Amino acid sequence: MIINSLSRHFKEGAKNLIRNGWMSFAAFSAVVVTLAIVGVSLLVALNVQQMSKYVANQLEVSAYLQQNLSNAEGQKIEMQVENIPGVKSVVLETKQQGLKQLETELGPQYGDLLKGLGTNPLPVTLIVKADNPRDTLQVANNLKTIPQIASVNDGAEYVRPLFRVLDIVRNIGAVLLLAMFLTAVFLISNTIRIAIFSRRREIEIMRLVGATNGFIRMPFLVESTLIGVFGGAVPAVALDFLYQYLYQISGGYFYGIHFPLISVNWFVIKVTVALLVLGFVLGFWGGFMSVRKFLRI
Amino acid sequence: MIINSLSRHFKEGAKNLIRNGWMSFAAFSAVVVTLAIVGVSLLVALNVQQMSKYVANQLEVSAYLQQNLSNAEGQKIEMQVENIPGVKSVVLETKQQGLKQLETELGPQYGDLLKGLGTNPLPVTLIVKADNPRDTLQVANNLKTIPQIASVNDGAEYVRPLFRVLDIVRNIGAVLLLAMFLTAVFLISNTIRIAIFSRRREIEIMRLVGATNGFIRMPFLVESTLIGVFGGAVPAVALDFLYQYLYQISGGYFYGIHFPLISVNWFVIKVTVALLVLGFVLGFWGGFMSVRKFLRI
Amino acid sequence: MIEMQDVWKEYANGTHALNGISVHITKGEFVYVVGPSGAGKSTFIKLMYREERPTRGHIFVNGFNIERLKNRKIPYLRRSIGVVFQDFKLLPRLTAGENVAYALEVISTPHRHIRKRVKEVMELVGLGDKLDVLPNQLSGGEQQRVAVARALVNNPSVIIADEPTGNLDPENSWGIMKLFQRINDRGTTIVMATHNKDIVNTIRKRVIAIENGKIVRDESKGMYGYDN
Amino acid sequence: MIEMQDVWKEYANGTHALNGISVHITKGEFVYVVGPSGAGKSTFIKLMYREERPTRGHIFVNGFNIERLKNRKIPYLRRSIGVVFQDFKLLPRLTAGENVAYALEVISTPHRHIRKRVKEVMELVGLGDKLDVLPNQLSGGEQQRVAVARALVNNPSVIIADEPTGNLDPENSWGIMKLFQRINDRGTTIVMATHNKDIVNTIRKRVIAIENGKIVRDESKGMYGYDN
Ligand SMILES: Nc1ncnc2c1ncn2[C@@H]1O[C@H](COP(=O)(O)OP(=O)(O)OP(=O)(O)O)[C@@H](O)[C@H]1O
Ligand SMILES: Nc1ncnc2c1ncn2[C@@H]1O[C@H](COP(=O)(O)OP(=O)(O)OP(=O)(O)O)[C@@H](O)[C@H]1O
Ligand SMILES: [Mg+2]
Ligand SMILES: [Mg+2]
């Protein structure tokens, strides 16, 4: 009995979708366009998040050992540092490597300055990364407590603004994404409401011939849910292809700059699922709310 | 006669707006939400543009004079450089200033290195900005032709990617803004179309009792234009206040970072005008297209 | 079966449509409701299936207390009444056949029964060949007959018909009346608002005459009255 | 005034509504169109004001050649004809008075004239007190009388009425008929589809009987026919 009536509601809903023709299409295309915007926002947000992570992962602390310690002694300390909790990796830079690098950094203009030096005045240096980039300063402080370490360049003046910028970007991104999402919710359910509004007379007639609210509501729900799901599927598929294309022509990097993009598979899954679920939920919910409104009359 | 009938159409349109109550409100709120998104996009885009300009304006070329030239001789060349077309400003850095700066740049760690030097090996340096930041490399090349200039640091390895990033940001921003705009056009006219669709029977009746298409269309146009204009005015005013507030709490700078935001007055005018015009055009156009559709029947 | 006790109806805009109506209609009766345009006939009828609520008074229909009836019980009241609306109220997106079938679907009639029954009733009203036509492709009289078919289709214990022959030629009108009479003979109560003097004066039944929202006459085997 | 030459009408769904109609109605005539439900009366009438287009044949109304009529000229044809639609077709968002006024507004009648004229016509149909009421707050017969008022209001040279008394009690029906007769006496052509035998047989005029899309009878001073 219930299956019988469920299949009836489904058939009626699908039939209405088709008989409404123009109106269904108008609502459907509103869903497509709105969810496409949500999808693009999602695309941008996921990649910005990825970039933030990537940038943060570049963070490192330079620990300069006492100047009198040799490269060999440095290696012992390297092992000690590796065991500090929160440290992800340690790279040792010998005195010779240090000098070489300074030369390159100064460039040919000032490079000559170094020629006048007798002994190599540079210390052995440990380049340390934290497990969690946000703990970088914490790790630097831990390093400072090791007596053989003369000084630590934690880049605090650089790390703090960096995270500030990343936080800002993340927060603004989250707010905008939320705004996009709420807008989509509003616009889609609003469109469905307007579409159903124009059929309130029909709903009234159905009630007059003895249909229960549930019986009236079901085909409308099927109809608006189908609009939502189809409306979500189109931008999902379109964005997948678009992203795949962009990913390919860019070689997986943001326009030749240093940031790797989110790989296609991962993205495909997230976006497809998000848009389909959104379409489904909004179609269902929009239909539910609007029919309820006219069932109360 | 014409004024009489214009005033009639306006009165009818306003009356319909009110009598349609719920439907008008639904269409109106769709316009508000859509144009609010356009407004926010505009806000972001204008500030990003401003920031790009700001960043580009920081670009400068360092021209190192022959090492044997004195500060006084440097000033002559400074005047010469100032006259090169495309040069906006030249700042002379004396040998002594150069040494000082190098010291600070190297930091306490390496600063000692310089103590061993006898004479100041640094050249007089001219720091040059171009009228148009994009001509920076051009200006650097011009400087290279001056014989007294030993070498030029044009930061090419830095300038090119910078403009690349700025171009990318600008292009993506433009594409997104255009997409937002087209979406708004579509969603608003779509909403108005659905709203008018539900009144096609009325339009049919009007035709049957002898109304010309123009006579039928006018009140609908007034109605949808009013919806558009009111729907544009709300986000325009809201964004003005919001931006004013954000500008105030941020002190006119992007969240304490170095970028100055667009000043409130300037923004107020742009956004208000843009949203009102958009609302007007979309309301009018959406109404026009949809009524036309049903007048053909 | 249908009972009204001192019922008043004032519409939201201040129109006093009914001013103290008391009436008792027993099971199996056939009642004409007559009266001039705007007298309150449709309002009287709308109260029975609770399209409108009375401002004052008590109404009982098929054992339902209309006053106390909860919103979600209304469909069950309406299923026990077949209504022919004055303005037909056909669902515009459903074909004539689907419109009639709808009244069976709401009471979960199995599919195969629906098809058969709809065909049968549509033939009774002379529209066996218009099953798959949309309402806006039917003539006025055809629409009215679809509305009649929908009211009959689920064998309700009461049929309420508001001007069911207004758009019909005399021949079709008599056809509908014969149908009503046959159904009435099987025990179905029939309440019918009408302006058709010929019918009322020929098929003599109880006549309730309403004027200005009051019952001015209530006679069994009455006449249309209102000579001119 | 109205001329049809071998007119056929097949609707998009394949229904043959009219099968070769030829008729000539001169200025000032009063014509009843009778026939069973679904015979083609409304289709016959809809062709005159070009709600429908003929599949074949020629139609001339008030000097307009319906076949050749350009879309943007249609309003001018319709302004010369007052139509009472079978389903009333009132604008749901306008009050009764505004609905009637609409027919005057489309021909740019000055404001003060409109108010006066609308009041006058609404009183003629007995609705002087319902000017400010929306159509869905009117009884069936009241809506029908508003539709009649709208058809008369701009003094058209032809009035076409499709079943204008279907929802009216005999008294109001006679009122409307007297109105039509008075208007007809002033030279207005009147074409009226009706099922009202009493009226046709009492106010004797030309009768065109349509059956299955064909004219089966066309008599001046005719009778309703169709005895039962
Ligand atoms: N929804 C409504 N709101 C306000 N007034 C209404 C409403 N429906 C009907 N009326 C008014 O109530 C009165 C009675 O209307 P009703 O429809 O009951 O008349 P009726 O007897 O059915 O007339 P008819 O024979 O013309 O159909 C009329 O004056 C009408 O204008
Ligand atoms: N829009 C349409 N599309 C298809 N068929 C139609 C349409 N309108 C009417 N018909 C069919 O054409 C035939 C004639 O219809 P018409 O409305 O002219 O009848 P009528 O004589 O006015 O009947 P009634 O007295 O019932 O109003 C009918 O069979 C009807 O079903
Ligand atoms: Mg009534
Ligand atoms: Mg007809």
Image (cartoon, coloured by chain):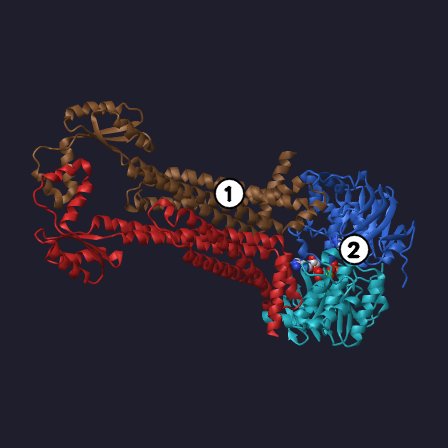
Chain colours: A red, B brown, C cyan, D blue
Q: CA distance from mark 1 to mark 2?
A: 47 Å
Q: Residue at x 62, y 50 (%)?
A: B197
Residue A202 spot, x, y in % from top left: 64, 60
- Chain letter for mark 1, please: B
**Disc 1: residue Cβ within 8 A of ligand 1's nearest atom:** no
Q: Closer to the camera, C91 or D25?
A: C91
- 1 or 2: mark nearer the eye: 2
**Pointer 1 and pointer 2: residues touching (CB < 8 Å)?**
no
Placement of C216 over or under A165, stated as above or below: below
Amino acid identity at mark 1: Gly
**Disc 2: residue Cβ within 8 A of ligand 2's nearest atom:** yes
Residue B37 spot, x, y in % from top left: 45, 48
Q: Which residue is mark 1?
A: B279
Q: Quadrant of residue D2?
A: top right
Look at the numbered disc 1 and give the secondary structure of its residue.
helix
Q: Quadrant of residue C88?
A: bottom right
Q: Is residue C39 visible?
A: no
Q: Residue at x 70, y 73 (%)?
A: C2
Placement of B261 over or under B132, stated as above or below: below
Placement of A146 over or under B151, stated as above or below: below
Q: Residues within 10 Å of mark 2 (few under 14, many from 20)?
A: few
Q: Quadrant of residue D107?
A: top right
Q: Which residue is mark 2?
A: D15
Amino acid identity at mark 2: Thr
